[in-house]
Amino acid sequence: MDQVALARLGNQSIFEAVSQVVDLVGGIDKYVKKGDLVLIKPNSFILARPETGFITHPEVVLAIAKLCHKRGARVVVGERRRNIFTNFQDYPEINDYAELISFDEAPLKLKTIPGAKALYMSIAIPRIVDECDVFINVPGLRTHALTDMSNGLKNVMGILPDNSTRLVHDLGLTDSIVDLNLARPSDLIVSDAIYSVQGNFPAGGEMIQTNFLMASTNMVAIDVVAATIMGFDPSAVEHINEAAARGLGPATLDEIKVVGSSLDSVRFTPQRADHDYGKYKDRLDITDGAACKGCRQSLASAIAAAAAEIGEEQIRDLRIITGPVETLPAGPRDRVLMYGSCTRRFKDQGTFIPGCPPLAGQGKKFIVKLCGKREEME
């Protein structure tokens, strides 16, 4: 039975809490030996302070690097984008234990993923991801507009360099997340839930202090427990469901042994991303009859983020088409947004945003732009 360890921060230091939660799943000696090349993958591609919850706390990463270095391993901390260097500027001690790298600048190799459903072609991944002896996945815990919640499974998306994550959205987010976890399974996951994120992330969101850590050797098991802690039904979170269906881990809490702190001691109820754009339908002409859950959630997040930026009253007089349609409904062709890859055939009939689903942040950008165009014409 897969184990997931929980440890409340309490009065102990972050290093002590990390050591505790890793010890609960066997201790670092179980995973790392002298001479190993260890790759630590935090969630640190956004430029942010740790207390925002938008990045893995650098002290959590530092603690893991110390433990691995003590074992005589060569330790590398990698993330796409160069923001990782800025995020660690206030933690120079990391350089005593690990090398920081940006995957955008790392040597790449082509890899074919057996059993892939979305990323079925050869993809370029950093060579170190494929060749490291130990891969330690260090995500942050948060709600998410497109996937309901984000933790261990989704953090592996960050092994793709530069703007390759757009490929994931073009080919299908859920299947791509699982494909990438097939490409490089995590040997150890240590989830940072000291500062978590609630709300409309990544187009928005706010910090909620939750003060605990999680650890496991199975990325599905830790996500099932994380979803449960946040009040989500794990079976309704599509990437967890798909990963379990493909044999990557247990599908239910009954198949997992929770050790350390109790589930009840760390449960919290975050504000979820807004997945309902119904209140805008009297001001927006939305055709969405056959749209999938992903595009609906992405669109709702994009509209909510645009409204937060320019004001609710500005979100009006815009036509949005999402999901598969045979013909465009009658109506004006100015200020039309084609949302999602299913509308590609009509991409010349308006502003087209590809993706399955599209990036909510990109959707917000164009909704703001198109609503602004209305002002210019009035």
Image (tube, rainbow, N blue to C red):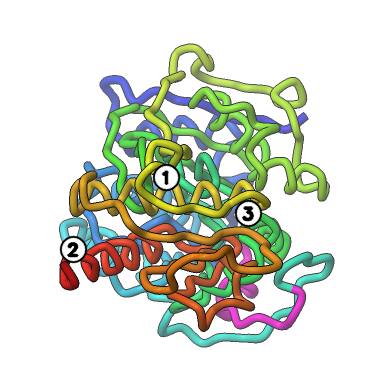
Q: Which mark is residue 361?
A: none
The reply to whether residue 168 is visible in this rendering is: no
- Name the spot of residue 22 as percent of width and height, x first: 51, 37
Nearer to us in this view, 356 or 167: 356
- Name the spot of residue 74 as percent of width and height, x first: 48, 68
Q: Earlier in the sequence, mark 1 or mark 3?
A: 1
Secondary element under disc 1, as helix, strand or loop, is: strand
Nearer to us in this view, 67 or 212: 212
Q: Is residue 194 left or right of residue 64?
A: left
Q: Measuring 28% from the left and 54% from the top, which residue is drawn there?
A: 306
Query: Of circles 1 and 2, which is in front?
Result: 1
Secondary element under disc 2, as helix, strand or loop, is: loop
Is residue 132 magenta-colored?
A: yes
Label 3 belongs to which residue? 186
Q: Measuring 36% from the left and 37% from the top, which residue is drawn there?
A: 199
Q: Which mark is residue 89?
A: 2
Secondary element under disc 3, as helix, strand or loop, is: loop
Is disc 1 in contact with disc 3, using a CB cutoff of under 8 Å?
no
Is residue 159 magenta-colored?
A: no
Is disc 2 in contact with disc 3, using a CB cutoff of under 8 Å?
no
